[in-house]
Amino acid sequence: MDFALIMFLLLVLSGCIWLLDHFVLKAKRKTGEPWWVEYAKSFFPVILVVFLLRSFLVEPFKIPSGSMIPTLQVGDFILVNKFTYGIRLPIISKKIIDMGNPERGDVMVFHYPENPSIDYIKRVIGLPGDVIIYRNKQLMVNGVVQQLKSEGEYNYVDNGLTFVHNNLYSETLGARVHPILQNPDMPALHAAAVSDFPMRDHCTYTFDEMRCTVPEGHYFMMGDNRDNSRDSRYWGFVPDRMIVGKAFLIWMNFGDLKRIGLTIK
């Protein structure tokens, strides 16, 4: 079950018990408060504060996979700004106050379109109306090649078992520069892994090229670890209603304390 929904149900339950005791039970009892009333009154304000903070200000997430290496490492605990892209109602994620929209290069958390109970994190590559081409591991946005600068090699051990060799690049996406990885031993695309996603007709695929026009109200996402990321190339576009927020800070990594406090670019 969604954690926000659990928090909401606990908030409603503890609040109802508190109100019931205050207006009905308190006047009738002759002894002290029963344990369940005491617990409800103690936990209600705590749950309320946490619920409001997570719903409207910041929410913590843990990075479970290597799809955003080198920007984010497995085990990073990050904070996500919940109001950068507008104020949304908890649970139903309906935007009620528009405060801005995602920009190319943002690292964004969203509900995974194929299973909305799971949260994903990728980089915003395409905005509504953009034409995205990925050909021979070269990214083009609206006909403009996004420049790559070689930064040497970047190797890591995947799942504690497999040594993975990559080439490290700085990619210029509009006015932003960020790191990406490319595995020289992997193909540009895995055509067999492309699912039959909504608005699939906005994309065309060949052996070494993907071309997509981003629909209105949707975004095209890719992982920085380009050959180890299942992203919009395979499952399609992220609707605005599934946006959670913008990742901005690494607040903990128990395996590498030097990463604490790093901003996410």
Image: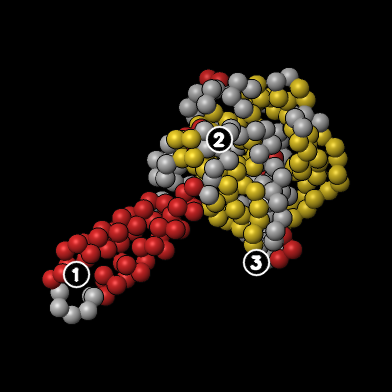
**Secondary structure under badge 1?**
helix
For the residue pair 205 and 261, the one nearer the viewer reads as 261
x then y, percent, for residue 229: 63, 42
Mark 3 to mark 2 CA distance (whole Å): 34 Å
The residue singled out by tag 3 in the image is 254
> Residue at left 81%, top 41%?
169
Q: Quadrant of residue 29?
A: bottom left
The residue singled out by tag 2 in the image is 99
**Secondary structure under badge 3?**
loop
x then y, percent, for residue 101: 58, 32
> Residue at left 66%, top 56%?
250
Between disc 2 and disc 1, whose residue precedes? 1
Judge left or right: residue 115 versus residue 172: left
Specify the quadrant that holds the C terminus: top right
Between disc 3 and disc 2, whose residue precedes? 2
> Residue at left 49%, top 54%?
53
Q: Mark 3 or mark 1, which is nearer to you?
A: 1
Mark 2 to mark 1 CA distance (whole Å): 45 Å
Q: Mark 2 or mark 1, which is nearer to you?
A: 1
In the image, which disc is placed on residue 26? 1
Mark 2 packing: few (<14 Cα in 10 Å), some, or many (20+)?
Answer: few
Q: Quadrant of residue 173?
A: top right
Judge left or right: residue 192 versus residue 69: left
- The amino acid beneath tag 3 is Phe
> Residue at left 53%, top 49%?
57
- The amino acid beneath tag 1 is Lys
**Secondary structure under badge 2?**
loop
- The amino acid beneath tag 2 is Met
x then y, percent, for residue 47: 40, 60
Judge left or right: residue 76 versus residue 93: right
Q: Quadrant of residue 116?
A: top left
Indicate whether 92 appears above or below 159. Answer: above
